[in-house]
Image (tube, rainbow, N blue to C red):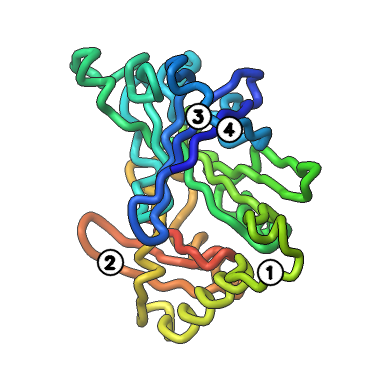
């Protein structure tokens, strides 16, 4: 477990508890306060971990924000999803809550806030997450330690949403102390993911692997998105990235891979 306290872009300090329950699954719980008993357990980190100024899924943050559980803009991914809610120790729905629920019930709700991933090439990522697929970059900063941080968001819905965070250049403890450290780097992992996709996704209707199934999803059903699924498929194709079509359930899906090697599911 890692406990951090950090500044957001609204000038306030927030707290994160980061846990690794199994494998490469990482969860982060974000809150605005901790009791005095545990305050000193939280290390100071000057890297902003979430943008409070940008639109988000925090209950009741502005007149345009929804009150209650998030809409189905981004569905929960299998891994790498981050939660919060506004209770005493975290954003658990207490200020806003669930319609028809008691305060006690609302405080038990975890609100999806962000997805956070690493990248070896921020420029390539910025060329992928563009208006062509209805995405805008809402934050970018380069830190003194050489790390880069970008936040992207889908333009629809216009009032709420899960933030997509990407980091480049964050070094491990071993890399900070040993410049010759030959570790399993972000670039090596991305290369492995892309190699796996290229071997298994044989066409736009054939092939799948476990890493494609490890995705986040953007739900364009019910008029939330202004793009056709063809737009997303053509974007993957123009970027030279693998993708494939599926059908079933209540509609159609396009699964594609972004430059990090992780996948996105577009529903329509």
135 or 8: nearer the eye? 8
Q: Which residue is mark 1?
A: 181
Count neighbours of disc 2 (C-alpha within 10 A) and say few if under 14, some if 14 to 19, many if 20 or more.
Answer: few
Q: On the picture, is 222 further left or further right than 63?
A: left
For the N terminus, which image quadrant? Answer: top left
- As drawn, the label of residue 120 is none
In primary-sequence order, the first of circles 2 and 3 is 3
Image quarter (top left, top right, bottom left or bottom right) of the C terminus: bottom left
Is residue 178 visible in the rendered image? The answer is yes
Secondary structure at badge 4 equals strand
Vertical relation: 173 (above or below) 136: below
Query: Could you tell whether 173 is left or right of 17 in the image?
Result: right
Mark 2 secondary-structure assignment: strand
Q: Which residue is mark 2?
A: 247
Mark 2 to mark 1: distance in Å?
45 Å
Separation of residues labelled 3 and 4 (CA atoms): 6 Å
Residue underneath mark 4:
43
> How far from the left and from the top, in percent, is residue 239?
62, 70
User: Disc 3 versus disc 1: distance between alpha carbons?
Assistant: 29 Å
Tell me the residue at 54%/53% (across/down): 117
Q: Could you say which is closer to the camera, residue 83 or residue 225?
A: 83
Residue 50, picture quadrant: top right
Residue 111, compared with residue 207, is above or below; it is above
Q: Position of residue 35 (x, y in %)?
A: 43, 16
Q: Position of residue 54 (x, y in %)?
A: 59, 29
Per the model, the C-alpha gap separating discs 1 and 4 is 25 Å
Q: Nearer the viewer, residue 206 or 230?
A: 206
Q: Residue at x 20, y 20 (%)?
A: 105
Compute the Cα span from label 4 to label 2. Answer: 47 Å
């Amino acid at each position: 477990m890692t406990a951090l306290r950090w500044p957001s872009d609204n000038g306030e300090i927030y707290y994160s508890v980061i846990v690794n329950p199994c494998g490469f699954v990482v969860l982060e719980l974000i809150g605005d306060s901790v009791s005095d008993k545990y305050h000193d357990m939280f290390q100071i980190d000057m890297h902003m971990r979430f943008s409070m100024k940008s639109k988000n899924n925090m209950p009741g943050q502005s007149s345009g924000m929804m009150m209650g559980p998030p809409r189905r803009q981004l569905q929960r991914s299998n891994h790498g999803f981050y939660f919060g809610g506004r209770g005493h120790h975290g954003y658990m729905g207490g200020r806003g809550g669930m319609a028809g629920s008691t305060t006690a019930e609302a405080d038990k709700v975890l609100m999806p806030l962000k997805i956070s991933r690493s990248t070896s090439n921020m420029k390539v990522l910025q060329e992928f997450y563009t208006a062509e697929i209805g995405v805008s970059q809402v934050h970018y900063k380069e830190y003194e330690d050489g790390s880069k941080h970008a936040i992207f968001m889908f333009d629809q819905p216009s009032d709420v949403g899960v933030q997509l965070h990407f980091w480049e250049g964050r070094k491990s403890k071993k890399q900070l102390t040993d410049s010759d450290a030959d570790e399993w780097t972000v670039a090596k992992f991305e290369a492995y993911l892309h190699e796996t996709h290229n071997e298994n996704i044989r066409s736009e209707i054939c092939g799948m692997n476990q890493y494609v199934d490890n995705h986040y999803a953007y739900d364009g059903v019910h008029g939330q998105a202004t793009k056709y699924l063809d737009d997303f498929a053509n974007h993957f194709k123009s970027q030279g990235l693998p993708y494939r079509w599926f059908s079933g359930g209540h509609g159609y899906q396009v699964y594609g891979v972004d430059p990090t090697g992780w996948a996105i599911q577009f529903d329509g």
